[in-house]
Image: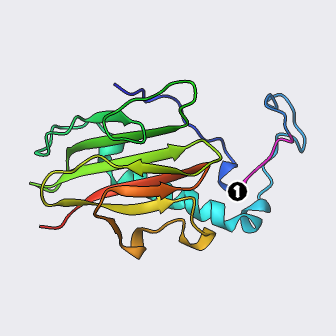
Amino acid sequence: MLSRGAALFLAGDEFCNTQFGNNNAYCQDNITSWLDWSRKEQFRDVFEFFKYMIAFRKRFKVITKNRRQGDCTLPPESLHSQKPWQTDFNPESRYVGVMYAGASSIPLLDEIVYFGMNAHWEPTEVELPGLPAGYVWRLYVDTGRDVEHVICENDNIMLYDRRLHMQGRTVMVAVAHRIA
């Protein structure tokens, strides 16, 4: 079972706030610990990305709530390396994929969401897990794309062959879509 730990973001991360390298600024009442709201306009693309991902998290309950078993027979949570269902996490491994699957609030429809993270500076080839009949992977986020196309949900990129080329140090999010 994957852990649902503490929040991964701090106030100000959504506009690239800095503490000038100080990771223990809680006791300082000065520019080191203050939020510089003027950075929001300078880093508007990061702010919009955060807004999108917060809305995404709320939209796909399978990644935040207790998952009910869906019709897809996939496990509620699973870890993957570049190949589906393999967990090749040796010291040189620099990729991890996490998939959540479960029943949707819409009857007879499952929610299946896959997050892929390439921590290596080199690109990598990834194969997503197979889906039940009638579903296909659709790319929603790819941080390896140009800034204006990082959120690619509306670009309608279907991954029929389940393969994806990921740039170095990037994250991707794919969602299973019913096509039949």
Q: Residue at x 82, y 32 (%)?
A: 25
Tell me which amino acid carries mark 1. Answer: Phe
Camera-nearest residue between 75 and 10: 75
Label 1 residue SS: helix
Q: Position of residue 33 (x, y in %)?
A: 82, 40
Picture coordinates of residue 7, whole percent (x, y): 54, 36
Q: Is residue 96 left or right of residue 179?
A: right
- For the point 50% across and 66% down, which residue is it? 151
Asked whether residue 18 is drawn in magenta, I would say: yes
Q: Quadrant of residue 64?
A: top left
Q: Main secondary structure of the magenta part?
A: loop
Give the side of residue 18 with respect to residue 91, left or right.
right
Is residue 54 shown to the viewer in this render?
A: no
Task: Say left or right for 47 vs 128.
Answer: right
Name the quarter where the C terminus is drawn: bottom left
Q: Residue at label 1?
A: 15
